[in-house]
Image: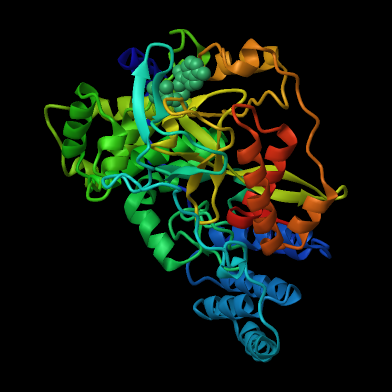
Amino acid sequence: MAANFLRAGQQRLTHCAERTLVDGKDNRKAAELCVEGNGMHYDNVKRYMDVVKLYNRSIAYSTNGSQQRAQAYWERSKVCVKLNRYADCLQNIRLARATDVPGLLRRKLDQSEQCARGMLLSVSDDATPGSSRHGVAPLKLSFPAYENAPRVANCLVMRRNLRYGRYLETNRALKVGDVVLIDSPYASVLEPDFCYARCDHCQRPAPFTLIPCEHCTKAMYCSEDCLNSARTQYHHFECALVHHLAETTGDPLVLLAWRAVARAIGAYRYNLRTLKQRRHLLSQTVVNPLLLDWVHGQNIAFSAVHILASLTRAPNDPAEVRAAQLAWEMHCHLVSKPELTANYDPDNVPYQWVGEMCYQFLKAMQCNARPAQLTRRDEPKGRYRAVPFALRCYPLISLLNHSCAPNVKCFDLRDGRCAVVVIQPIAAGGQLFGNYGYDYSETGRDERREALQRDYGFTCNCNACENNFPTAEPFHSKRVDTILRTRDMSTAARNMAKLLAEVNEGVGDGRVSHQQLAELERYFELLYCEVLN
Ligand SMILES: C[S@@+](CC[C@H](N)C(=O)[O-])C[C@H]1O[C@@H](n2cnc3c(N)ncnc32)[C@H](O)[C@@H]1O
């Protein structure tokens, strides 16, 4: 089927092969963005962030060494001063000096540097979330890990059946709070709103110090290390295409699929022939990702991701045709890369299987991508809510099936990994169920079932759907909000331990209440995840 659709995509997009995509720098646009930032009135943190994002876009659009870039760094340094971020201010001054700085600006930089140095000695910079000021020991698995797969507790096993396909099961009883899997994403892309505020590679927030990719206007990084890692691992192949896809589809899922393909090519050192062999082998083997060698195998994550389940849709589904078009577009872009055609295979022109792989990844991402979320306090009510900032695909978390009353929850840790934590007791031999975004406590049964059928292609028969659990009151507690607002880590840790002891001693076979769970989740998020005030 994939081949037919690729042909359909090919017919519609034959022009694409002749066209080389470019995402060129543009100093005029860079100057305009800077002026737009200067014209914004800003007096609160949210507004500062909007202004900084404009300066960051200006930096991304400017050419290396240009006056426009110097100007944007200088403007960003001034915002740093307003927010008392003197170390960041100095960093921007250093970056500006590395460009073509006009005389007047050079003098301003000198003065500003002196002031910032003085202020730095008298105050300490506010650290960004995720830094060591949080002072909480890194999260660990609650049980010994598999020797070959240190990210998985060895009580988990993978099984298959007709109803669920592959699934994860525990061979020992698990209690609320147990951490059984800490996975790293295979591919990850920022949501558009966060593009000019976070590092495109490690995705940590770094709005005041981002540096640009010198070949496109989209990717910015928190350090030279991240820039170089991204370039060698995948960005080399996506640079211009990312801009094109973002402009034409605006869909992070498409970018994620593309990045997964680019990563696969990077992992096999741009050698398409070896990648093709590996792919061929995987399609014929029944792979159990828990038994792969995650310690020594460089390309293991590709193997795990490659065999992810994909949706089966009707052949004339418009989404299928769209996927095929996009896959063909990706394919054309790839085969236009000289370093790939250096491995030119005369028996296999023009690498149709690359297009098929793009198509497969696009489909796999539709049911395996999950949003990475942070928790943010929203004004004016001061309530905390989850905000998605990236879309990610995890090789092992993708084995979790869905329940509207899940027994595990995935938490996006500050370091970029994702932890699977038990939130309802699970007996030995029980399956682990995550949640795909449709929880009984928030959404009625019919709406959930319809959405799950549409997005993931299955009819949900979980406990909550069979027994039609009623939706629950949203959780709200001033006491817990105060702990979050003041970042009171020690009270959060104490309260969490007390609550865990209560629920684990009291529950027997019963369920943890919605309110208890919500409180536990808030504490866990404050201790290990990103919480913004
Ligand atoms: C992220 S994958 C989960 C792992 C999948 N079972 C596999 O074999 O790769 C998502 C897919 O699993 C299946 N699935 C997930 N939850 C399910 C459920 N509660 N009942 C039936 N199928 C489910 C659906 O086909 C869905 O598109």
Q: Position of residue 443 (x, y in %)?
A: 72, 22
- Residue 81, picture quadrant: bottom right
Residue 343 visible within the image = yes
Q: Residue at x 17, y 44 (%)?
A: 342
Q: Nearer the viewer, residue 518 or 299?
A: 518
Q: Residue at x 42, y 19 (%)?
A: 12
Colour pattern of the rendering: rainbow
Q: Position of residue 204 (x, y in %)?
A: 54, 58
Indicate whether 309 appears above or below 192: above
Question: Which quarter of the rendering shows the C terminus?
Answer: bottom right
- Residue 286, picture quadrant: top left
Q: Position of residue 250 (x, y in %)?
A: 57, 35
Indicate whether 247 appears above or below 404: below
Q: How many marks on residues? A: 0
- Give the side of residue 44 with respect to residue 300, left or right: right
Question: Which quarter of the rendering shows the N terminus?
Answer: top left
Indicate whether 284 appears above or below 45: above
Q: Residue furthest left?
A: 347
Q: Residue at x 80, y 57 (%)?
A: 482
Q: Position of residue 2 (x, y in %)?
A: 34, 17
Residue 521 visible within the image = no
